[in-house]
Image: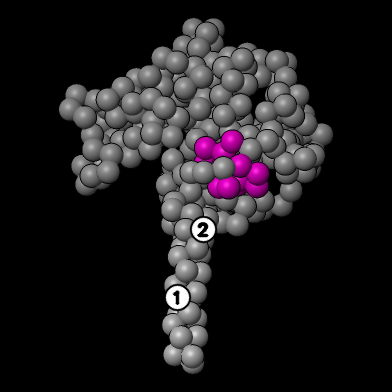
Amino acid sequence: MALLNMKKDVLLTFVLLGIVALAIPTHVTSQNCNCAPNLCCSQFGFCGTSDQYCGRGCKAGPCTSSPTPGGGGSGSVANIVTPAFFDAIKNRAAADCAGKSFYTRDAFIKAVNSFPQFGSGSADNSKREIAAFFAHVTHETGHLCYVEEIDKSNAYCDKGNTQYPCVAGKSYYGRGPMQITWNYNYGAAGQAIGFDGLKSPETVAKDPVVSFKTALWFWMTNVHSVVNQGFGATIQKINGALECNGKQPALVQARIGYYTDYCKKFGVSPGENLSC
């Protein structure tokens, strides 16, 4: 009888282990927010694609959840990024700028609907993040003037990247509101957003909604997680290697100037740690 009970216990143990194994999500990679671009970072810091990752509490990636109650989200973002605010940026660009007719507030609002965690959090934090985003966009595009990088001589092809290999004849120079560059960014952004970034990088300069989506993808993937560390941390993430630590203080100050101006327009303090 003792032997029989032991066999039953062993069998029960294996059954329970099997149930636990089935309960473990198949897309879990690691407990952090450095997920691949096509994966969501759950509220507990795991990477995956199902609703438990991309749904409620999703921190980054292609989230499908509604905005955090009282936070930002596309509805509040639209209330903050008014037509007057958007046009005030664009109106400072020269009349012959390509971005004058390309960048529109409607395109931005359509794009931001795909990123419900952008501008989420408290009302003040939402305003600071939006101010930071547009400060960098203003700086990168010359007040929404440039759709493409001026100097197109560099193809920005990292031949060592085998995950997103360069396509012959294609260049991955800066395009869009955040001037996305390099084949690995075009490839990852395209995979996350839904266009062929490697074969058709020019889409970023032809479709304004896709263009803003690439900027928001880059922001949510690389910058969103450090917004609460101060504006200086966002500069570090975007162009720290070239501008921070005294390398190009004038450019850093220009970014800070736009940020503090937009914070003032939104009626929120800019916070601390403005410089990198």
Q: Residue furthest left?
A: 168
Tags 1 and 2 touching, CB below 8 Å: no
Q: Position of residue 73 (x, y in %)?
A: 69, 33
Instruction: Tell me which residue sits at (45%, 30%) in the image.
Output: 193
Q: Which residue is mark 1?
A: 11
Label 1 element class: helix
Spatial CA span between label 1 and label 2: 19 Å
Q: Residues within 10 Å of mark 1 (few under 14, many from 20)?
A: few
Q: Position of residue 269 (x, y in %)?
A: 79, 42
Q: Residue furthest right?
A: 267
Residue 167 is at least partly visible in this image? yes
**First reached walking from the N terminus: tag 1 or tag 2:** 1
Which circle marks residue 172 in the picture? none
Q: Nearer the viewer, mark 1 or mark 2?
A: 1
The kind of residue on which mark 2 rests is Ala
Taking depth in this image into account, of 43 and 133 the one nearest to the observer is 43
Instruction: Tell me which residue sits at (63%, 34%) in the image.
Output: 116
Range drawn in magenta: 52-64
Taking depth in this image into account, of 244 and 238 the one nearest to the observer is 238
Instruction: Tell me which residue sits at (43%, 53%) in the image.
Output: 26
Q: Position of residue 119 (x, y in %)?
A: 67, 37
125 is higher (above) or lower (below) than 99: below
- Magenta stretch secondary structure, dominant: loop
Residue 14: image quadrant is bottom left
28 is higher (above) or lower (below) than 255: below
Q: Which residue is mark 2?
A: 23
The kind of residue on which mark 1 rests is Leu
Does residue 56 belong to the magenta stretch?
yes
201 is higher (above) or lower (below) than 20: above
